[in-house]
Amino acid sequence: EAKRHLNEEDLLTWAREGVAIAQHSFRSWEAATEYFKATPDVVGRMPFKHVLSWARWGRALSADSPVVSSSFFRASPDALSRITPDDIGQWATIGKTLYKGTWKSSSLAATYFEVSPRLLQSLSLVELEELVGFIDALAQKSYDLANECLTIADGVFAKIDRADRRSFLVLAGVLARTNWRDIKPLFENGARILAHIERGQRSRFLNLAERLTRRQGSSVISFLLDSSTALGEIPQAKHSQILNMSERLAGASPAAVGEFLRNTPQVMNLVKEEQIDLWFEEGLRILQENEDGGLAFFRLESGRGEKVLESLSNGLQLERVKEILTMYCRALAGQQVELQSTQELKERGIGWTAAEQPTTEGDNIFLPSFVERYPSKDQNFGWFKVIATHQVAHLEFGSFDFLFDKPSVKFAGQDQRLVIGAGAGYGKDPAAFITDLQKFFSMFPDRQLASDIFTFVEDGRIDHRVKREYPGLRPTYEVVQREAVADRPQPNTLPLREALMEVLIRLSLEDKSKITTPTELGGIIDAVAEIVRIVQQAGAEVEDSAEATLRVYEIVSQVPNLEAVPERSEERESGDMGNSPDSQKLQEMIEQLTAGSSGQGNAPPQGRQEQEYKRPEQVEFRGDFKPELVQALDNLKQQAQKTKQDMKQRGIAKEDLKRMLQESAEIEFSDVEQGEIDRSAGMFVDNLMNEAAKQQSKARSGGQFVHVPDDETPLQVQEPKSFLYDEWDFRAADYKPRWCCVREKQMEEGTQDFYDKTLKNHAMLAAKIKKQFEMLAPQAMKKIKHLPDGDEYDFDAVVESVIEKMAGDTPTDKVYWRRNKQDRDVAVVFLLDMSASTAEAVDETRRQFDSWDLPDDPRDYMAWLRNRREEMTRRTYKRIIDIEKESTVLLIRALEAIGDSYGIYGFSGYGRENVEFYVIKDIDERFG
C-alpha cells in the first residue's frame, strides 16, 4: 500500500523513520510496529510531507514513551477522519502535555490518544485542548480519576450543547482545585442535570454553580442535582427570573442559593407567579440582617416566612387548619379520627391512588394538602370544611356499617336483596364473602355499574342528611353543590345510559336548576327520581341506599347506551321529576321497570349506534368513596384483635382477599396482562394486611414511638394526643414551625410505699414545710353578703327586705356586703425532669451536716444516727430522680393540708420528634 502511494525516495525515507522509532528504547519496537500497521490507512489521505510530519511526531513521542507513541499511531487513522493533516501536530502536542515522565502519566496520555477520535466527534481541537487542560489539573489529585473522566468524556460532551461546554469545563476545573472528588459525579450526571434547565440558561446555571464552588468549597453535586430538579418543576419561561434572584442571593449568602432554588417550586404552588418577587425580597432583607434567619426563611423553616406566605397566598394549607378541623371532625364522628394528607394514604399502596381527592379509610380523614380553589382564605376554608364534613359523615351516618341481612327502613317489607340473597344461597357459607358489601355487589352482573349507582345514591343520602343535621353548614354546602352541578355536562349531550346516570348524579346533588334530558327517558327519569327521594328522607340508612341501588340498577341496565340526539330533548325542573300527580300510576311504572319488562320509554329509532359505556365523572367535593375496601380493612383489623381462642375460627385468607380485590370495582387493574393483575392484587393484599396489623399494633401500644433519623424538616403528627410546637432558633431569631412533637402519656397508678417511706424518713421536714405553707396569707378577696354593716348595700338583700316589710314580716337588717381576704385561690403545677440524665447518682456523703434533719432530743438523735448508719451501709447514693420524687412527696403533703389544687407532670425526650409529657396527677384529679 505504501509503494502504491510513495515514490522510491519517499518510501526509503518512510522506512528509515520506522527504524528510527524502533531504536529509541527497548520497547520502541512496539511503537514502530504500530507505525507500520497504521501507514496503509494514513498514506493515501495526505501528502508525503504530512506523512513525514506525522511519523516524526510519533518518533518524538516514542522518545518519551513507546506506550504513548503506540497509542498515537493506533488512533491516527480514526483521528484523521475528524481533523486535517495540518492539525496533527496540535493533536499530538495536546496529548504530549499529559506525559510527565511517570508510568501513570504515560497511561493517561495513551488513554487520551485512544479516546480522542471519539471526543473529536463532538469537540473541536480548541475544546479538546481545554478538556485536556482540566484532565491534567485533575491528574495532580488522582490519575485514576483523571483516567476515568477521560474515558467517559465522549459520552458526556456528546449530550451537552456546544454553547454550554466551556462553562461545564470551567466548573470542572474549579472542582479539580477545590473538591476533586465531585468531578466524577459531575461527569456522570452532567447531561441529566442540564436537561432540566431551559436551554438558553444552562451556561448561566453552570456559572452560578462555579461561583458558589469558589466561595463555599463544599459539595456542589447535591446543589446541582437538587436545584436542577427544582428548576425542572418550574415553567422554563421563569428560569431566567429565578436565576436572576439566585445570582443576587449568591452575593449575600452562597448557602442561601441552594435553599432558595430547592423550595421555590413549593412556594410557587402557594402564591401567584407575580408574588414570588415579594416573597424573595422579604427573604433577602432578612438574610442581609441575619444570615441564619434568612437561611431559615428560604428553607421554609421560619415563622416569619410562613406569615409572609400566608399573607401572599389566597390558598390554604391543610397544616394551617388541621388542628381546628381535627377537633371539628372528632366532634361530628364521636371518635378519635385524625386528619392527614391524601398523599400519605396514596403512598401506603392499599388501594387509594388519587393524590388530591378527599377520602377516608374508616379511621382517619384524608384531605388535599393545599387548596386554592377560591380567591379568599375564608372561601377555601369553607371548601375544606365541606369536604371534611362529607368524609366524616360517612363515619357518623354509617356508610361503612352496611349489613347484608339487616332490613332497610324506608323499603321495609320490600327488601329485594334479602329475597335474592336467600335464593342464591348466600347464607349457607358465611365465610364465602369477606365483607357484606362484597356479598351485595356480587348480586350484580355489572359490578362497576352497580358500584357507581351505590356511590351516587349513598353520597346523596349523606349530603341530604348533613344539611338536615347541621343547618349552619347548609349555605356553604349548597354553594359547593351548585358549583359541582355547574361543571357537569347536560344529560342530553350524552348517550342514553350515561345521560340517565348523569341525571342520577344531579338528583343526588339536589340540583334545583332546569335539566335538559332526552325525551326518550321521560318516564324512566321519573322512576329513578322517585327512588332517590326515598333515600333522601329522614331516617334513611345505608341499607336503604342498597335497596335503592338494586331498583335503579334494574332500570339503568335496561337502557341501551345509544348515541345522543340533542334535538330530541326537553327541559325539566328537577323538583318535578318523580312528583307525578298520579302516585299510584308512578308506583306501577317503577314496579314495571324494576321487574325488567318494558320500561325503556319510547323505543329508540332504528339505525342509532350504541356507544361504549363510560363511567361518569366523579363529584369533586365527595372525593374517593371505597366502602368495600374500608369494610375489608376493618375486618382485617378485627381479625388482628382476636385472641388465640378466637383464632381457632377461620380468619380471612389471603386468597379470599385477593379474589375480592380482583372482583371489586373500587380498584382498577386496567390495561395489564393477567399475570400483572395477579401480582398487583397480591401487592394490595400484602399492603392491606400489613396496614391492618400496623393500625392494630399502634392501638395496642398507644402509638408507641419509633425513632427516625432527623432530616431537619418540620414534623407531622399521626398519633393521638401528640402535638406539634414551634421552637425558638436563637441564631435565626425566629421560630422553627412545627419543630417539636410532644406526646402526652398517662402514667399508670403505682403503690403508696414510696410515699409512706418518704414521709416517715423526713417527718420533721414535712412538718416544717406544712407549717410554712399554712402561714401563707389568703390571696383572693371574697365577697361577704348579708352583713349588718359593710362597704356598700347588697341590692338583692335590700329588695328582699322591702318585700318582707310590705308583706308584714319583720325585715332583715343585714343588707350590706364587703370584701374580705378569706379565700385562697392558688393552683400549683409541678413539672419533673424525668429524662435519662436523672438516673445519675447524687453523692449523699457530700451533703452538708447542717442540712440533715437532726432531732433535738438526745434519745431521738441516737436512734436517728443508728438508722442513718444502717442506711449508709445499704446504699451510698441516691439518684437525681429519687430526690425529685421525695421533694414532690413533701410538697404534696403540705398542699393537701391547706387544700390548694395541684398537678404533677413530667417530661422526657429522645430527639425533637419524641418529647414525652407524662400526666402523673392532673390538676383536677383527687389525691389518692
Image: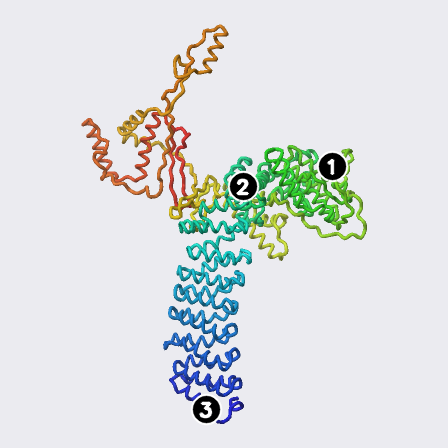
- Identify the residue shown where x is 62% and y is 33%: 468
Q: Earlier in the sequence, mark 2 or mark 1?
A: 2
Identify residue for label 3.
13
- Give above or below for 544 relative to 158: above
Circle 1 SS class: helix
Judged from this view, the residue extending furthest toward the left is 858
Q: Earlier in the sequence, mark 3 or mark 2?
A: 3
Residue 309 shows up from this direction? yes
Which of the 4 quarters of the picture holds residue 745?
Answer: top left
Q: CA distance from mark 3 to mark 1?
A: 110 Å
User: In the rendered image, which quarter is residue 628 located in?
Assistant: top right
Q: Are marks 2 and 1 in contact (CB under 8 Å)?
A: no
Q: Which residue is mark 2?
A: 363
Q: Which numbered marker is on residue 59?
A: none
Counting every numbered tag in the picture gives: 3
Q: Position of residue 459 (x, y in %)?
A: 63, 40
- Report x, y in % for residue 447: 67, 47
- As drawn, the residue found furthest toward the top would be 808
Residue found at x 25% / y 41%: 843
Question: In the image, what residue type sits under mark 3?
Answer: Thr
Position of 650 compared to 785: left or right? right
Is disc 3 placed on a helix, strand or loop?
Answer: helix
Read off the residue under disc 1.
576
Name the foreground residue: 41 vs 871: 41
Assign the C terminus to one quadrant of the image. Answer: top left
- The x, y position of residue 456, in whole percent, is 66, 42
Q: Nearer the viewer, mark 3 or mark 2?
A: 3
Front residue of this view, candidates 180 and 46: 46
Q: Which amino acid lies under the numbered mark 2 shown in the image of this protein? A: Asp
